[in-house]
Image (spheres, grey):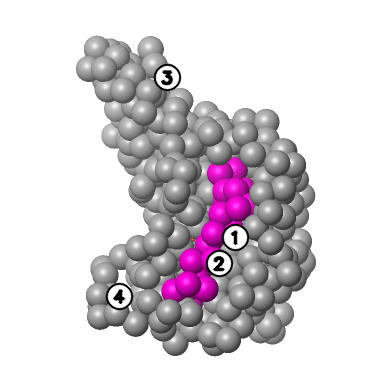
Amino acid sequence: MLTRESFENLDKDDQLAYCRDLFDLSPNLVYLNGNSLGAMPKSVTGKLKELAEKEWSGGLIRSWLTSSWYEMPQRIGDKIARLIGAGPGEVIVADSTSVNLFKLVAAALNKQKPRYKIVADTENFPTDLYVLQGLASMLPQVELVLAERDQLEQLVDENTAILVLAQTAYKSGELYDMEAVTALAQSKGALMLWDLSHSCGAFPVDLNGVGADLAVGCGYKYLNGGPGAPAYLYVAKTLQADLKQPLAGWMGHADPFAMSLEYQPAEGIRSMLCGTHPVIGMASLEQGVDLFGDIDMQLVVMKSRQMGELFIRLVEERCSDYGFKLASPRDSSKRGSQVSFQHDQAYAIMQALIERDVIGDFRAPDCIRFGFTPLYLRYVDIWRAVDRLEEVMENALWNDEKYKSKNAVT
Ligand SMILES: *Cc1c(COP(=O)(O)O)cnc(C)c1O
């Protein structure tokens, strides 16, 4: 049997324990939803105050130069590159994940003509599928093929322009073997695009190592960039000269302030920009990204796996009578930094937990999902979460009318 004391001892030995204090988190809160919206770095408050009072209010338009606003997309992109195994000039921060996906897939389709298929899987995040559906409906010759995980080998063929997958499935947390799947796509002549939204910041990713062509990802999850933070995209150096994205705005122009009548794409990754970036959102994101500074991502992944394993063990020890079914891979090397369980009453159970200061989330139709963010979670949080879950189940606290009607955001 696991004891609370054993979790407290793990916290004492945790080399990442000091990181929690870099975030603004109430000591009583067990926050297992950093995979959806990361916690706020304490440094954000000061940075935003400085931005408002000095850079915006005082500096006004001069701050594009004097406070280096103009360089933010590339500067922050280069910092994110380190976390995903990309080189300088291969990552840029811009727009949202959805919009970045649109830009890259449209550019890839253009480059790959006469190939006409986009292959994606059914475990992909809905917005990714919707963007691909939108592209396919706009381009009559393009076809979107949806595959199950085990059908990729069969469905990626000589007509496939691009394979689009999330490395970490948002619901189950199941991982793809990036190296093997990238090789599969490229062996058929397709480009490989990875969505790293649930990967980057949770464990090391090596885009250059696996030879990936393209990637997108989110700024507000494990990167702790704040609600609706800008996203990022990656284009391998070798592909950059060949890719033309369709949202050709002036910030992607070779010389925006020449104000010429003709679009001329910038060289390199800057051509992936569209319009003026949101400086306030970028500033928050940079605080989140800077926290990773020189943190060893091997420590992060080890803690994440251990937390997931302990969580599963505890739920199975203490809640085995209540009908939970593990909906994530048991093997932590095949799982991202999250664990999901299926249950008929998943929504009401999660509402009851949230009211008791254990925040996870519900994913339709029947999953409760718990994310593990090694920078600011304590091992004892795992203990407390399952303790509350047992209390909610043992006393059927979920069985209350107020937990039954669904909110607009789950
Ligand atoms: C969170 C997430 C997104 C979010 O897209 P937005 O454009 O920021 O809303 C996209 N794809 C995946 C796989 C995600 O996990």
Classify 365 as above or below 210. below
Instruction: Identify the mark nearer the N-term, 4 or 3.
Output: 3
Of tags 3 and 2, the one toward the viewer is: 2
* The disc label shown at residue 386, or none: 2
Q: Nearer the viewer, residue 10 or 258?
A: 10
Numbered disc 2: secondary structure: helix
In the rendered image, residue 222 lying in the magenta stretch gets the answer: no
Residue 336, percent from left and from top: 64, 62
The reply to whether callout 2 and callout 4 are in contact (CB within 8 Å) is no
Q: Label 2: how many residues lie within 10 Å, few (<14), some (14-19) or many (20+)?
A: many
Q: Nearer the viewer, residue 249 or 398?
A: 398
Q: What residue is at 36 percent from the left and 48 percent from the top?
A: 228
- The residue where tag 4 is placed is 403
- The residue where tag 1 is placed is 383
Q: What residue is at 75 percent from the left and 45 percent from the top?
A: 298
Numbered disc 3: secondary structure: loop
Over which residues does the magenta segment extend?
A: 367-392
- The residue where tag 3 is placed is 68
Q: Amino acid at mark 2?
A: Val
